[in-house]
Each structure stands twice: as structure tokens, then as C-alpha cells.
Image: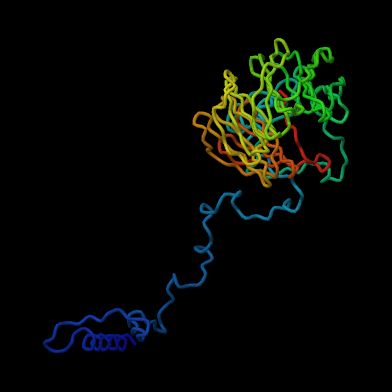
Amino acid sequence: MRFSRIVFLVIALLLLRAGHSYGGPGKPPVFDPPPFPDDPLPLPDPFDLPFPDDPPVPWDVPFDPINDLPDPIDLPLPPEDPIDDPFDDLPFPDPIDLEDPFPDVPSLLPGDVLGFGAMPVDPGSGPTAAPAANATNVTTKLMPFPMRIPFHPAYSGKRAAPTKRVCDSSNATQLIIPESKKNTVAFVNTCPWGRTATVTVGLHPAGIAGTPDGTFALVTNLGDGTSSGSVSVVNIATHAVARTITFPFAPDGSAVQPNTIAVLPDGSRAYVTSHSCNPGSFVFIIDLASFNIVGNIPVGCFPSSMAVTPDGSQLWVSQRGDSRLDAFDTATNTRVASFNVPFATGIAFNPTGTTAYAAEGFSPGFIDVIDTSTYQRTAQIPVGSLPHVVAVTPSGHHIFVTNGLSNSISQISGVSNTVVRTIKLPNNLQHPTGLVFIH
């Protein structure tokens, strides 16, 4: 058998050498080009032909129960495995974002929220501090790769009392809310929650602003449209109207309808818009030392919002009827910049005054981001339908926008200029038009 195999191999090699290696006697060798798709398959190498008596090659065995098992070192870590989570079908809420959605509100929990301030330590890996004498919990050894913890009472079939709101009277404040249909303003305490006083003001109160020293609340009263409206000066401590500022007719002969109001940071002056268009409107200036009207600034149709820069040097007025946003110098009352903002509504500044956020009251709407040093728009952020009020957190980290027709609030990152959250409101709170932060 061995001799016949050797003879066969020698004959095959001679045939290949005679027919393919040389062009013929006295001719140089010719190398065949690689086969093309239409060429016949090349002859197999006789050395690769298996013989019946040859043992199987180890790497040709279809399955090796030892070598073909996966190496446990190469397996992915448990969180990456596509395991079947038994809780995926339960209506769990979305996981908590690591970014604090309300960074400007102090935490009600002691220490770091969720423990993200420091990495956990395995009790078995080294010495740990002993629990306090009054501690009711003990540290347990960490389990590997913990996933979810279902603890909502509904999942166990038990009914539990709702969690009570934590009330810290040292941080309590009060809200002053115009009640337009009642011709009153409501004083609402934040801790404990409840109305503490009701003060009657003028006809159809619309806007409100406090003086920087916290003494007075200035309430704009629209009036009935035939006679000019007024501003009620409410003493915050006594819950009483200290005086009423009545507006004369505007320079164009129309009745003044006081709407929005803004106060300079030094408390020297207040600015009040008239919600009218004949064909334009006015911003009236009130001296807060004498509570007299000392001037006016012509603006466009239906001014809808105002904001003063943090340094008090400029007053920005959005005019929805003319799709315009104007910036005025508060020292000279002259216009220093003008912007085309379709259906302009809300306006607000970041804490340093370097950036302005102006709402386009479209459906859907947008927030224009404006560099106040160059008066150039640097970004445009899509939000909900008919954005109305724009408010920036005291840290400047986030901007909140009420969307009137979407019945929602958009939360925008001041760093990325993107919407990071949309807060849907209950159906009984349709058309949100107010927003304020409680410090």
C-alpha cells in the first residue's frame, strides 16, 4: 500500500511538471494566471487528497467537547449579557437621571443623593466606620451587579399612605398670585401650604413684580378697556394696598392696559407695558421713590414680555404683534438693538447677562439663544407649541419654558442648548402661562 502511494505521487508530479511548469523543450517557463470565474476549477493538490487509511485531523472534527467550549475569561460581564429581565414587563418608571433636574433646589435628603458623592466600599475589603449609635440600618456586603428593586406598594398588592411632603419652615416663602376674574391677589404660603390672605386690587390683575427690598408687590390691572388701568402697590407685610397708580390715556389717545411689569435691580424704577396696538404701544416708566409716572418708551404692537439685564443697564421688550424684540438702554431709554423674532413672547437672561433666551410663539415654537455682547443669535431650540414664559434657574444651568398649546414645560440645558426633559401637565392645568422658582 505504501509503495503504490509513492508511485502514484511520483507520476502525478511528473505529469504536472511536464504539462504546466514549462512551455516545452528549450522554452522559458510559463506561469498560469489565476483562474477567472468562467475558468474551470484548478486541479486539487494531490498532497491534500485524503486517503481512506489516514486518521482524521484533530482540527477537522466538527465538535470538541473540551476545546470548543467558550473561555469564561472572554465572556462579557453580567450587565452586558442579554439576560431575560423578569421585571421588564412591569410598568416601572424611567430610571432616575444622574443629572439633577432641579440643581437650584436644596436636597431634602441628608448627604449625597443616591450616594453618588463617593464610591461604595466593600465591607470585606478593609476597615469601615462603625454605624452611629442611633442608626437603624446596617451595612451589608455588596452584591455583584445589582439591577432593579421593585418596592412600589402597588406591585405587592398593598395599599400605602402617600409620602408626605417635607416642610421646612426656615426655608418657607410665599407666592403672590393675581386672580384676574376676582380682581384680587392671593398670598399663598409654601410651608405649610395654604392661602394666608386675599387682597382686593384693580380690575383684572394681570402681572406682578416685587421690589428688590421685599417691601412691596406691584400689581398691574388691565382695566375694562374703556378707561386706563392702574398699578396697585401692595404692602407685603400688612397685606394691604398702600397706594394705586392710575394711568392717563396714552400719547396716541388710547386707554392704557397695564400688562407685564419689570423692576430695575436697584429698585429705582419700574417698567409697565400697555397691551395694545394703535398702531404701536408704549412702555411706561414709574419712579419708585415717588410712585409717579415719569416717562414712556414707544414700542411695537402688543408687548408681551419684558426682562431687565442683571446689571440693570438694558431693558428687553418682546412685541408679539410685530414679531420683534427690542433692547433699550435704561440710562437714556433709547433703542440699542432690534431682532426679528416671530410672534415674540417670553424673554429671560442667564445670571451673568451674557445670554438672552427669547421665545418664538409658533406652533411648534422655538427658543432663540442670543449673545448679548454681539447681538447675534447663536442657537435655536425647538420646544412645544406656543411657548409663553421663559425662566432661567439662578445657577443658569437650566431654562424652563411653558408651552401653552402643548400643555407642557420644556427643560433646556444651558450648556448644550438642548431640551433635556418635557414635563407634561395634567389635563386640568391646560394652557400654562406662569412659572416661578421658589428659593
Q: Which of 120 and 354 is in front in this view?
A: 354
Q: Residue furthest front?
A: 253
Residue 169 sits above or below residue 182 on the image: above
Residue 207 sits above or below residue 245 on the image: below
The C terminus - image quarter: top right
Place residue 136 in its image quadrant: top right
Residue beneath the point at 51% across and 53% down: 74
Place residue 202 in its image quadrant: top right
Q: Is residue 168 visible?
A: no
Residue beneath the point at 58% across and 31% down: 356
- Measured as percent of width and height from the top left, residue 174 is found at 79, 21
Q: Is residue 237 visible?
A: yes
- Measured as percent of width and height from the top left, residue 289 is found at 70, 10
Q: How is the image coloured?
A: rainbow
Q: Nearer the viewer, residue 258 or 41?
A: 258
- Measured as percent of width and height from the top left, residue 180 is found at 84, 29
Residue beneath the point at 51% across and 52% down: 73
- Measured as percent of width and height from the top left, residue 44 is found at 35, 83
Q: Which of 401 and 415 is in front in this view?
A: 401
Residue 293 sits above or below residue 363 on the image: above
The N terminus - image quarter: bottom left
